[in-house]
Image (cartoon, rainbow, N blue to C red):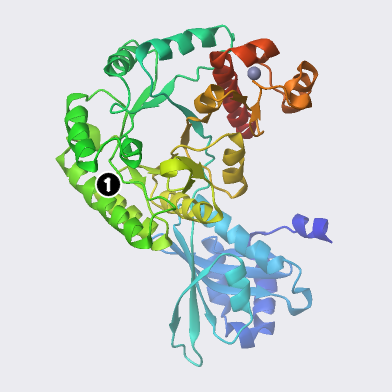
């Protein structure tokens, strides 16, 4: 049955379908009202009737990019077989192709069809008085389903020699991918040598994108006050108009904060971001990355509204649940997934790029994908931090501590098995002893695992 339905062919009605459509319409007159033959003929001429032998859908594309449904009719004997759904989805797909932004229809309040439209993703926007009975107005916004291939941004807040060492070490891997092509670093928490180094790499075209992080983490950790951060950033950004991204200064709410504190931090983030943005020249405004903060939907929406009004083209989400000392560990709670989904959906609607700040490892990333949350870019420090703590991960896996001999996974045999299972191989994990003893080998292996995770999902 299912297969049969998928084969069901809908097409634009042609002149030869006129009589069948008229018969269908007449036999459902009590539902559709009276449709004159001329209306059908005119609609067929302008390709505004989608037809299959069991039903038809009559719509009209308005000049303001809204497509209105006039009639949807499915023969009584063929209902509940997915025909109406097929007709509506054909209308939706065609409308999207034509650049239509919204579908609209009206349905008498007492009809069960209201549930059908709700099910198809329409939203009830109003109730209007009709000729005989009230009508529910349904709308559905249309988005071009752009295929996003998330890009990894290497978060590197270290000095010149350390970063240079890692870049050199990567070359041993003979991997044509360059994990350092897109980097994010925080000028306030990196040694001054880092700025000159990245600027130089940029001038020599050895990196594609350098983003400057605002360093809110320093405030979160109590190492700087927010005022210190603001004045540092203002000065630094104004003097460094060569980078490709500038994260605006936010205050990160923590899960341990009271509701009042969270509210204060969100309001302050919005206010300061607007204020800061206004002071920046065009070069920086065009490259600003506005951090969306909030632990409730209304807070998130307020941030989004403010940033959209400011005219930024890129927003970032990093408002995860937090745990650990000073909220140093990000957690992907159910609630943060819900908030992130709202951010991604709103961004799509307004054509904004979305960055994901400080995601954990490949496992967290996969959880995003499972929830249909696909950011354009993401950064992580986990590859670096985990390596420092003696841990490694493979594509799509959680961390394993290799510096201590524990179970099977920390034996050469166990490691080989994992590599096969995850289809991963790199120069750095060829030797278990090296992984055990070299922090940088662990870091580089984790980086390779990150790239593999993104590549396998991007296929
Ligand atoms: Zn490896």
Q: Residues within 10 Å of mark 1 (few under 14, many from 20)?
A: few
Q: Where is residue 299 in the image (x, y as percent from the top left)?
A: 36, 59
Residue plotted at (65% across, 34% down): 398
Q: Quadrant of residue 74?
A: bottom right
Considering the image in quadrants, where does the C terminus appear? top right
Residue plotted at (64% across, 64% down): 87
Residue 428 appearing in the image: no
Q: In this view, does 51 lie above or below 336?
A: below
Q: In which quarter of the image is residue 34?
A: bottom right
Q: In which quarter of the image is residue 62?
A: bottom left
For the view shown, which residue lies furthest in the bottom direction? 132
Q: Position of residue 447 (x, y in %)?
A: 55, 22
Q: Which of 209 and 319 is in front in this view?
A: 319
The reply, left or right, for residue 286 in relation to residue 25 is: left
The reply, left or right, for residue 78 in relation to residue 131 is: right
Q: Which of 18 and 63 is in front in this view?
A: 63
Q: Where is residue 312 in the image (x, y as percent from the top left)?
A: 30, 44
What residue would you read off at disc 1? 311
């Amino acid at each position: 049955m299912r297969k049969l339905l998928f084969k069901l062919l809908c097409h634009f009605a042609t002149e030869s379908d006129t009589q069948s459509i008229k018969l269908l319409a007449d036999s459902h007159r009590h539902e559709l009202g009276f449709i004159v033959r001329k209306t059908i003929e005119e609609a067929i001429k302008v390709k505004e009737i989608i037809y299959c032998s069991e039903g038809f859908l009559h719509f009209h594309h308005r000049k303001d990019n809204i497509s209105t449904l006039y009639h949807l009719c499915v023969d009584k004997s063929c209902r509940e077989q997915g025909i109406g759904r097929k007709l509506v989805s054909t209308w939706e797909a065609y409308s999207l192709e034509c650049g239509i932004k919204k579908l609209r229809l009206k349905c008498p309040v007492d009809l069960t069809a209201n549930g059908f439209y709700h099910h198809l993703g329409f939203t009830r926007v109003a109730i209007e008085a009709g000729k005989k009975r009230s009508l529910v107005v349904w709308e559905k916004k249309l988005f071009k389903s752009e295929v996003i291939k998330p890009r990894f941004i290497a978060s590197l807040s270290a000095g010149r020699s350390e970063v240079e060492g890692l870049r050199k070490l990567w070359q041993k891997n003979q991997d044509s991918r360059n994990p350092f092509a897109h980097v994010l670093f925080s000028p306030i928490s990196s040694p001054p040598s880092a700025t000159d180094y990245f600027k130089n790499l940029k001038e020599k075209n050895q990196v594609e994108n350098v983003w400057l992080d605002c360093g809110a983490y320093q405030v979160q950790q109590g190492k700087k006050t927010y005022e210190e951060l603001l004045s540092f950033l203002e000065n630094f950004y104004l003097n460094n108009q060569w980078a490709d991204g500038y994260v605006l200064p936010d205050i990160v709410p923590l899960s341990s904060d009271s509701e009042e504190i969270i509210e204060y931090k969100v309001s302050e983030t919005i206010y300061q971001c607007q204020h800061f943005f206004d002071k920046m020249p065009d070069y920086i405004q065009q490259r600003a990355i506005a951090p969306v903060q909030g632990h409730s939907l209304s807070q998130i929406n307020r941030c989004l509204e403010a940033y959209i009004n400011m005219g930024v083209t890129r927003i970032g989400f990093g408002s995860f649940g937090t745990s650990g000392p000073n909220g140093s560990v990000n957690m992907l709670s159910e609630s943060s997934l819900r908030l992130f989904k709202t951010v991604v959906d709103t961004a799509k609607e307004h054509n904004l790029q979305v960055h994901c700040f400080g995601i954990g490892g490949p496992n967290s990333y996969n959880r995003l994908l499972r929830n249909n949350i696909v950011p354009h870019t993401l950064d992580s420090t986990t590859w670096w931090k985990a390596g420092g703590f003696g841990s490694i991960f493979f594509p799509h896996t959680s961390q394993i501590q290799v510096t201590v001999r524990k179970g099977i996974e920390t034996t050469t045999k166990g490691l080989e098995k994992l590599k096969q299972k995850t289809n991963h191989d790199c120069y750095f994990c060829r030797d278990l002893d090296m992984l055990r003893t070299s922090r940088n080998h662990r870091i580089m292996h984790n980086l390779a695992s990150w790239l593999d995770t993104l590549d396998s999902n991007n296929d």
